[in-house]
Amino acid sequence: MPNPNFTLTRTLLGRLTLTTQDGQTHDDVVPVRAFPIAAPDEGIALVSMDGHELAWVDRLQELPDDLRDLIAAELASREFMPEIHRIKQVSTFATPSTWQVETDRGDTQLTLKGEEDIRRLPGGVLLIADSHGVQFLIRDLLALDRHSRKLLDRFL
């Protein structure tokens, strides 16, 4: 396991502080995934509050356990992207439309403002932005049940 060229600690206020090998410290560091959907555990930048990259992690699993857990916990607290497993019903096939969906975080509803809020990504992945800015993920369009695919086809 390669030794990272930095250390990372959590302050009493719950923020991350990065210390480089040369002793420089950077407060309020934020981990950012380069490829949050395609490769969530690869390519993670540790950036300052002004957006400058301070450190790079090729693969999260290559880090020591304590460092990996700290970064993973910070990413989990910042990211919220429920994965849709089933579309139960839609209020109308015109937009705006309210959808009743089953996600990996439970049942909820979202409001689709327009068809342009459904983005196709490589590999049959869909990203759906609701009217409140929450991003919902459909990881595999073909894995949805027939009823869900039929409802979704009306918007694609």
Image (cartoon, grey):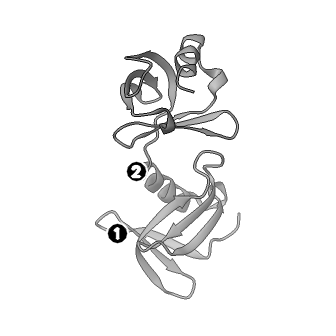
Residue name at image x 38 percent, y 43 percent: 133
* Residue 152 placement: quadrant: top right
- Whether 100 is drawn above or below 122: the answer is above
Q: Are marks 2 and 1 in contact (CB under 8 Å)?
A: no
Q: Position of residue 26 (x, y in %)?
A: 43, 79
Residue 148 vs residue 71, the one in the foreground: 148
Indicate which disc residue 77 carries.
2
Indicate which disc residue 43 carries.
none
Residue at the left extreme? 13
Give the tally of numbered discs: 2
Residue that carries the numbered disc 1 in the rendered image: 11
Image quadrant for the C terminus? top right
Which amino acid lies under the numbered mark 2 shown in the image of this protein?
Answer: Ser
Distance (Cα) linking label 2 and label 1: 16 Å
Residue name at image x 59 percent, y 14 percent: 145
Crowding near pointer 1: few (<14 within 10 Å), some, many (20+)? few
Q: Position of residue 7 (x, y in %)?
A: 52, 73
- Whether 148 is drawn above or below 63: the answer is above
Dot 2 falls on a residue whose secondary structure is helix
Which amino acid lies under the numbered mark 1 shown in the image of this protein?
Answer: Thr
Residue name at image x 38 percent, y 24 percent: 97
Please give left or right for residue 123 compared with residue 76 in the image: right
Residue at the top extreme? 147
